[in-house]
Amino acid sequence: MNRANYLGAWILIPELCVYQKGTPPLTGKYIISGNDHEIRFRIDWTDTEGTDHKLEFGGSLDGATNNVATPGITGVSYEKIDANTLDSTAYVNADVVMYARRVVSFRKDLLVVSQISYTDDGSFSNFQVYRREATWIA
């Protein structure tokens, strides 16, 4: 497989983020690690109230839906589209509740995350931009 350019550490640029619901964090760090077979994410952020948060998740990078024990979802899939693009989809049973696409810029210095969530109240999307802090393949 081609080297995955989205692997590495990324720093949020809050002023370039657009949220339909909620507000962008004050700060954020997005770490994506893995290989050709699996992917891991760690997101650290500080919200507008000054509260720190951390989220870790990941799984098989084959596009198959895997069961998870995460509140609010029953399954998730991750798929490498190409060296610059990574998709994930979260499910409740057979229903899609969230879809995210991560795309690395041509110069490989920016990462855009576009996410859409489907709720009982309708759908909403959030758009985030990160700058590269570090790169690695492991």
Image: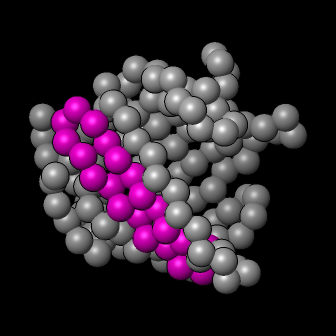
Residue 20's x, y, as percent? 73, 58
- Look at the image and tell me whether residue 81 can be seen: no
Residue at (36% x, 73% y) in the render: 131
78 with respect to 50 (left or right): left
Residue at (68% x, 62% y) in the render: 19
Q: Quadrant of residue 119?
A: top right
Residue at (51% x, 23% y) in the render: 67
Residue 116's x, y, as percent? 63, 44
Residue closest to the far front: 69
Residue closest to the far top: 94
Residue 109 is a magenta residue: no
Image quadrant containing the N terminus: top left
Residue 29 is a magenta residue: yes
Residue 18's x, y, as percent? 63, 66
130 with respect to 54 (left or right): left
25 or 71, which is in the foreground?
71
Question: Up-down: is 63 above or below 97?
Answer: above
Residue 114's x, y, as percent? 53, 51
Q: Quadrant of residue 86?
A: top left
Question: Up-down: is 111 above or below 100?
Answer: below
The figure's colour scheme reads: one colour
- Does the magenta stretch mainly form a helix, a strand or a loop? strand
Residue at (40% x, 20% y) in the render: 64
Q: Quadrant of residue 130?
A: bottom left
- Look at the image and tell me whether residue 42 can be seen: yes
71 with respect to 137 (left or right): right
Residue closest to the far right: 121
Magenta stretch in the rendered image = 25-45
56 or 35, which is in the foreground?
56
Question: Up-down: is 88 above or below 105?
Answer: above
Question: Up-down: is 23 above or below 80?
Answer: below
